[in-house]
Image (cartoon, rainbow, N blue to C red):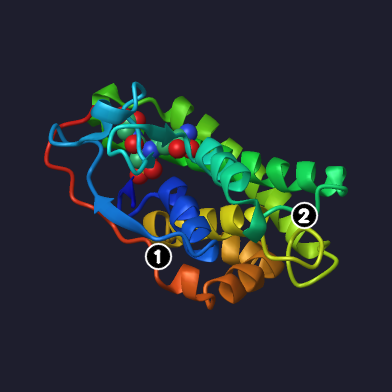
Amino acid sequence: MFTLISATPSPYARKVRIALAEKNIPFTLQTEVPWDSTTATPAYNPLEKLPVLILDDGKSAVYESHYILEWLEAKYPDTSLLPDTKDVDKRLFARKIEVVCDGICDALVLAFFEKMREEDRRSQPWIDRQMRKVDGGLKALGQWAENKEGEFLVGDKFGLADIAVGSVCGYLAVRWPDNGWQDTYPALKKHWQMLEERPSFRDTKPSPQTMKDKVV
Ligand SMILES: N[C@@H](CCC(=O)N[C@@H](CS(=O)(=O)O)C(=O)NCC(=O)O)C(=O)O
């Protein structure tokens, strides 16, 4: 059986947890704090990041959330999370939405750790730059949610784009509760709330973690 190294707040890991659940792939969840020296991630991922999907042999590993999802799509095509193969542009659009969602998360992580620095070592211009990317990314998600044709973001089928958007919105709600995106983008908020009703979302709600070691 697969093992997924995950962390309770991780939006990247939540994408994989949701995809595994939606594809009915059984796995063992190994919850860690990747910033602590006790993490197992370096043993499987040279980039020392989670999520990491450890395969049945207990040694081989797949890492980087967008690649794990691509790997799962290739290995388990029956329960696809992408539009039909003939709909090339829709498939590419779904991946573009994931790119924006991952980029928002990347900027949030950078801002989060910059804010952890002592005041005299903290760069406010750096934090402002990251939050500009978050604002720009959310504006794009807000427009896509506003303009979606069906119940889901790409075509009339639940998939990768919904998983990515739901994960970043859930992360913001936990880690950045004062961010006003839910008021600014009501269609995005409504879409996220609909997604959170799915069992795969209900079973993977993010929560804060406690870091033991000093990171920055
Ligand atoms: N691009 C990676 C980003 C993953 C990532 O940044 N993971 C964090 C944990 S979390 O932010 O998702 O909670 C991590 O392991 N960071 C450890 C490190 O950067 O050393 C992905 O998509 O999987």
Is 81 placed left or right of 85 in the picture?
left
Q: Nearer the viewer, mark 1 or mark 2?
A: 2
Q: Quadrant of ligand 1?
A: top left
x and y percentages locating residue 163 in the rendered image: 58, 57
- Is 132 placed above or below 168 here? above
Q: How many marks?
A: 2
Q: Is residue 135 visible?
A: no
Q: Quadrant of residue 207?
A: bottom left
Identify the secondary structure beneath mark 2. loop
- Between 103 and 39, the one lying in front of the other is 39
| Residue depicted at x 31% and y 38% | 57
Residue tagged 1:
204
Identify the secondary structure beneath mark 1. loop
| Amino acid type shown at disc 2 | Pro
x and y percentages locating residue 139 in the rendered image: 70, 50
Q: CA distance from mark 1 to mark 2?
A: 24 Å
| Residue depicted at x 77% and y 58% | 154
- Between 113 and 147, the one lying in front of the other is 147
**Mark 2 CB in 8 Å range of ligand 1?**
no
Which is nearer the N-term, disc 1 or disc 2? 2
Q: Is residue 123 visible?
A: yes
- Is 186 placed above or below 165 here? below
Is 9 placed left or right of 146 in the picture?
left
Residue tagged 2:
83
x and y percentages locating residue 32 in the rendered image: 22, 46
| Amino acid type shown at disc 1 | Thr
Q: Marks 2 and 1: in contact by CB < 8 Å?
A: no
- Between 144 and 8, the one lying in front of the other is 8
| Residue depicted at x 71% and y 52% | 82
- Is 27 placed above or below 85 here? below
Numbered label attached to residue 168: none
